[in-house]
Image (cartoon, rainbow, N blue to C red):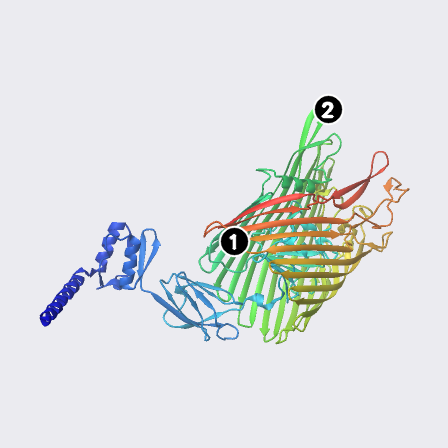
Amino acid sequence: MWKTKYYILICLSVFILSKVQGQDLQQKIPISVVLDEISKIHSISFNYETSLLENLKIKPPLETLSLSAKIKNLENQTGFVFEQISPMVYSISKPLKLCGYIKDSELQTPLTGATIKSKYAYAITDENGYFEIALKSKSELLTIRHLGFKTIERQAKFFNLKECFTISMFVQQELIAPVLVETYIVKGIDKRKDWTTSIDYNRFSLLPGLIESDVLQTVQALPSILSVDETVSNINIRGGSNDQNLMLWDDIKMYQTGHFFGLISSFNPLMTQTAHVINNGSDVSLTDGVSGTIHMQTNQQIDSKFNSIFGLNFLNAELFSNIPIGNKSSLQIASRKSLDEVVRTPTYEVYFDRVTQDTEAESNVLNVTNSNQEFNFYDASLRWLYQPTDNDLIRLNFILINNNLGFNENATINGAAQSRRSNVSQNSLAVGLNYQRQWSKRLSTTLNIYDTEYKLEALNADVLNNQLQLQENIVSESSILLNNTYKKNQWQFNLGYQFTETEVINLNDIDLPRFVRRDEEILREHSAFGQAWYKNPSNDFSVRGGVRANYLSKFQKLIIEPRLSVRQSLGDNIEIEAQGEFKHQSTSQIVNFQNDFLGVEKRRWQLSDNDSIPVLQSKQVSLGITYKNSGWLLDAIGYFKKVDGITTQSQSFTTKYEFAKQKGNYDAFGLEFLCRKSFGNFNSWLSYSYINNTYTFEALEDRVFPSNFDITHSITLGTTFSNNSWNISAGLNYRIGKPTSVPLDGNEIVDDAINFDIANNERLLDYLRIDASALYKFKISNALRSEVGASVWNISDRENAINNYYRINNNDVVDKFSRFSLGLTTNAVLRVYF
């Protein structure tokens, strides 16, 4: 009986199996028929090569399935890739496999741990530098990364898909100068082994009183860098005047640095990614800047992802966008516009009052009133990167900066109301082209060309006398620089040439009585430079030395400038460095009269004439020691600097020697000290600067006396808390008052002029400011994130005098006037990242 049941079961199983197989064979139909049916139902179309699907049969997916489920079913049955290339079109292709070896372009050694990432897959190279990755299509974007090397981003079709091949990665240039001290003050401020202090705003946390990544505010946190009048356009580095600083934006020299006529930086913080500060031992490729160099740079990497940032604070609105153009190019655009035309905030009012303080824009002469006071600013910047090959990189830069202040002067003349408008504007326009070529693993060339234009213009309407005065200061400069770099083992050599042509125009035009004076000067300079840089194999000793030879054709003057920087490690925790340099510059800012350009921006650029305005020449040496261990950092530097060729007109005299026109020099020796402690999410620091800064003017009554920038003692104390969501910072700034001259007590007036005592024998009251700021970062969605913040500047609302001057009134009595820094000033910001 059981045998009968057994045979029946076998026969039934065979029958069922044959029926199922028969049904499957019957249900399999040509894939083209299935695709046509799906196209009709879902109103889509498929793109594919006819030969790819020839003679292929599949089982149709159930009609009740969704479109995405049907596509998934087709992929499982065929092994093909179905990619949606538009809302109504799908492409069909065979899956691809990419394999290869990744090596160092210089040493040709395998790179272990390099990452290869596509939209759908991920791979890591092994000890031989080998990788395999599956791709869905030739258009899929691959990103190859390895620490210390330039990131490669290419579509799969640009690689060899037929066989495994070798991919060479180029060393990131920043490896030339690895970090010596990370988090020098706060996160994002580092001291590097190329003897510069760098600021990286991609990693930056926060400084007291700041909610914007304002470069020229940030650098003032460093020892021996401050502004005696609290403006970013008047930064003093180791006792030098502001015009002695070389300001570079992506290798373009800038003659305008501030908005609000100096209160905030004119360089868009969303565009500027890094900054390098050089006090001494400059690279020989750099000219000008006898006191120091601040080199601001935009992002130097091609970003293949679109992103955008919108920001709004109490002063301006700003926008930044990164726009990829294919896989080899990207465009960055940034703009900023003041809010005065829409709304005038309390913060704006405080800034406006500070700018117009004791100027004709604030209060006019008797019987004249001002009205319709307006101030606005804007800037726009662009950076285009194009990398046609792995060995070539092209960068194009553009920047536009504008400040404009205007007001009406009103008076009643002969019983009739009269009104005329006065205004002052400050504009910059610059274009730069940079080309880098890697000829071989050892030899590279950089070509940099720029043209920069600066214009300061004031139209001063005298409504009482029916007079109009036009003043202009124009600087036009073009430059071309060629720099060749050769590397071999521990050596790096540089050889280059630079040509610069600078034109300065000064115009004074008065309509009644008619007077016109226009001065135009041009100076051409040829420079050749060479440099060698050696680093021993253990990287505990480094020396860089070079010479720059400059020829000023107009004066037939040759200036030789040697430069040297040395660093030696003593164990793991101590570094000693020594630096020295000679530098020169041919432009300076002078003040003829305090009421020039409505007194708002009274400084004008002037070319050297090699006589009354000499070529500035400096000599500087410094010696420093750094100790770092267990979160502690102690850094001390002593220096001596001598600058020849200064003039009284360039030194911002407002008391004695305000109208003098003499040339001289200054000697400055000082000490910079920084103590920083990192613990957990906190960074706390104390910095102290000492300087003895002395003028020598042989032709003046007071031959030797303290400099106007002799801030003998200054102290900064601060702490910052930083985590993934919060940045909070608070700090204190203290310094003794700047030197000033006062009328001689009991004999204030002689021959209808103020009779001053010994020059700069008094000081203003000490300067003290307490600031705080906070930023909170949060995620809105997967595609959006945001941050909000607030700051308070000068929390105690202390009235800090930054300058004074004296005038004789109608009663033959000397009146004292003072200019003050910002009082209690609040600000808030909102940024959204797309």
Which labelled disc corresponds to residue 414? 2
Choose between 605 and 62: the one closer to the eye: 62
Left or right side of 612 for 395? left
Residue 627: image location, x then y, percent: 69, 67
What crowding class fits label 2: few (fewer than 14 Cα within 10 Å), some (14-19), or many (20 or more)?
few
- Tell us which disc is closer to us: 2 or 1: 1
Left or right side of 657 for 730? left
- Looking at the image, the residue that sits furthest to the right is 746
Secondary structure under the numbered disc 1 in the rendered image: strand
**Residue 372 visible (yes or no):** yes
Residue type marked 1: Gln
Residue type marked 2: Asn
Between marks 2 and 1, how big is the CA–CA gap? Answer: 57 Å
Residue 705: image location, x then y, percent: 84, 54
Choose between 258 and 210: the one closer to the eye: 210
Residue 132 lies, with reference to residue 423, above or below; the image says below
Left or right side of 620 for 313? left
Quadrant for the N terminus in the image: bottom left
Q: Which residue is mark 1?
A: 332
Of the two numbered discs 2 and 1 on the same chain, state the one appearing first in sequence: 1
Residue 522: image location, x then y, percent: 68, 54
Residue 264: image location, x then y, percent: 64, 48
**Residue 318 visible (yes or no):** no
Which labelled disc corresponds to residue 505? none
Residue 417 lies, with reference to residue 39, above or below; the image says above
